[in-house]
Image: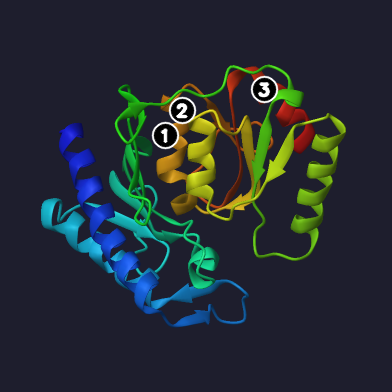
Amino acid sequence: MNIVKTVDVAKEAALAAGEVLSDCFLSGLSIRTKGASVELVSDADINAERAIAEVIRSHFPDHGILGEEENSDDAETEHLWIVDPLDGTTNFAYGIPHFAVSVAYYANGIPQCGVIFNPLRRDWYVAERGQGATHNDVSLQVGTQTTLSEVLIGTGFYYDRGAMMEATLAAIDRLFKQQIRGIRRFGTASLDLAMVASGQFGAFFEYQLSPWDFAAARLLVEEAGGKVTTCSGSDLPLQKTSLLAAAPGLYDSVLELVR
């Protein structure tokens, strides 16, 4: 596979989806819940994913696509695109301009390139395996801090309002007792992970994420020098999972508190 070409296709797909989202954000959208869930979905999610799929299939018609809304190819497919057409749907629905498109290409289960695009801010985060990570063409590097009192920690809450929420709050309590600088919860996992890659966060954790939430951002953090695992310290699977991303000097300390 030509990795440069897959990166270019990822950018093209993200831009196509970003145009859909920008238009909907400015003109209004229809929001509904997914079944009995409190999880939101919009026409923007669906139309943006269709735009992504159209671009990918125009270049690689035999590749699989795993997306949040309509594309559900097997995660073990040899050539697989993992896409989130609108990461941060709740922000989007409430008029908060903090959301992103996430597009990643995996070969035999290994991330090869990832793109995260905030269409309103025109922010591009791009990672290629072995080639580093960038934000608007400027190289990214995770933070060099080694003590928790120096850093902000990012987190996220799944839609569960029971045990998972309680576990997250308990972990936050433990982190504050270690005198961290503060907690931030912005509601868009891909951009939260980008903040680890850029050194703005020392770490980010969440107890349930889907592959499309982290597929691109995971590579971004790793290529910026960070470490990404489950919250128990295991290798990250391509399925629903907990996730911990951290700068190397902080990883062990944060893992102990969120495990």
- In this picture the colour scheme is rainbow
Residue depicted at x 28% and y 53%: 14
Q: Amino acid at mark 1?
A: Leu
> Which percent across, then down, holds residue 72?
37, 63
> Which percent across, then down, holds residue 206?
64, 47
Q: Quadrant of the C terminus?
A: top right
Eyeballing the image, is 209 above or below 248?
Answer: below
Eyeballing the image, is 253 above or below 117?
Answer: above
Eyeballing the image, is 184 above or below 153?
Answer: below
Residue assigned mark 3: 250
Q: Is residue 90 left or right of residue 113?
A: right
Mark 2 Cα within 10 Å, few/some/many (few <14, many 20+)? many
Q: Nearer the viewer, mark 1 or mark 3?
A: 3
Query: Gap in Å between the C-alphas at discs 1 and 2?
Result: 5 Å
Q: Is residue 202 left or right of residue 225?
A: right
Q: Amino acid at mark 2?
A: Glu
Dot label at residue 222: 2
Which numbered disc flags the more N-terminal residue, 2 or 3? 2
Q: Is residue 158 left or right of residue 14?
A: right
Residue assigned mark 1: 219
Q: Quadrant of the N terminus?
A: top left
Which numbered disc flags the more N-terminal residue, 1 or 3? 1
Mark 1 touches mark 2? (CB < 8 Å): yes
Asked which secondary structure carries label 2, the reply is helix
Residue depicted at x 50% and y 60%: 88
